[in-house]
Image (tube, rainbow, N blue to C red):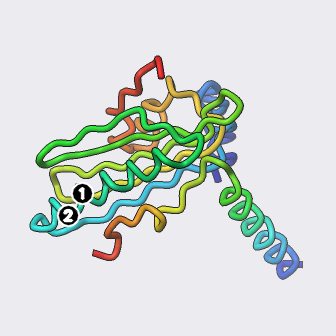
Amino acid sequence: MWMLLGLLMALALSGNLAAQEEDPGYVDFDTLDLPFDG
Amino acid sequence: MLRLIAESTRDDDPAFADLLDRLTLIHVQSVPFESRDAEYVHERVARAAARFDRIQNWERVVHVRGKKESSFVSLKTRRGRVAGLLMVVVDARSEVFCINIVGDIDLAQIGRIGRKFDIEQLEEVRIPKKR
């Protein structure tokens, strides 16, 4: 049961992230070419 | 997560809950840098702002360039609505802040989001009404 819930949560989270990345207002900070790595 | 916060604040502040309900993401990243690299970082931020000017439907609405601080705010519009906000701030304490808000954004409420989530850069931003 818990494994199934965990799997559903993981699917929901990954789906949510994918949805955000496809969102027109989403910005991947890595593409800003700012010195995030110091 | 935003839905969860929206629902947990709905009883105390229904207007703020509605505001959060229309958003899909609030992403904040801050990175310190060495003060000797300040000029280089300011230059990078200016370049990033210029690059976003060339991306379709992104419009820069604020750009401040000072000796110690610089910032820009660009907005993504879609069908006449603001669908994304990007704010990059280089502050005098040698930190770069990147803030991305995604969703159906009410610009008049940006300061409120800043106050609620303790993002001082958003509290201070003044976006011109006429763009």
Residue at 64% from the left image edge and 54% from the top image edge: B1
Q: Chain of mark 1?
A: B
The correct choice, above or below, for B60 with respect to A16 in the image is above
3D distance between C-alphas at marks 2 and 1 = 5 Å
Reading the image, the residue beneath label 1 is B43
Q: Residue at x 73, y 66 (%)?
A: A13
- Asked whether B35 or B25 is in front, the reply is B35
Horizontal relation, residue B96 to residue B4: left or right = left
In the image, B131 versus B13, the foreground residue is B131
Q: Amino acid at mark 2?
A: Tyr
Above or below, B82 relative to B130: below
Q: Which mark is residue B122?
A: none
Q: Would residue B7 appear left or right of B65 to someone viewing this image?
A: right
Q: Is residue B8 left or right of residue B65?
A: right
Crowding at dot 1, Cα within 10 Å, few <14 / some 14-19 / many 20+, comes out as: some
Q: Secondary structure at mark 1?
A: helix
Element type where label 2 sits in the image: helix
The amino acid pointed to by label 1 is Glu
Q: Which residue is mark 2?
A: B40
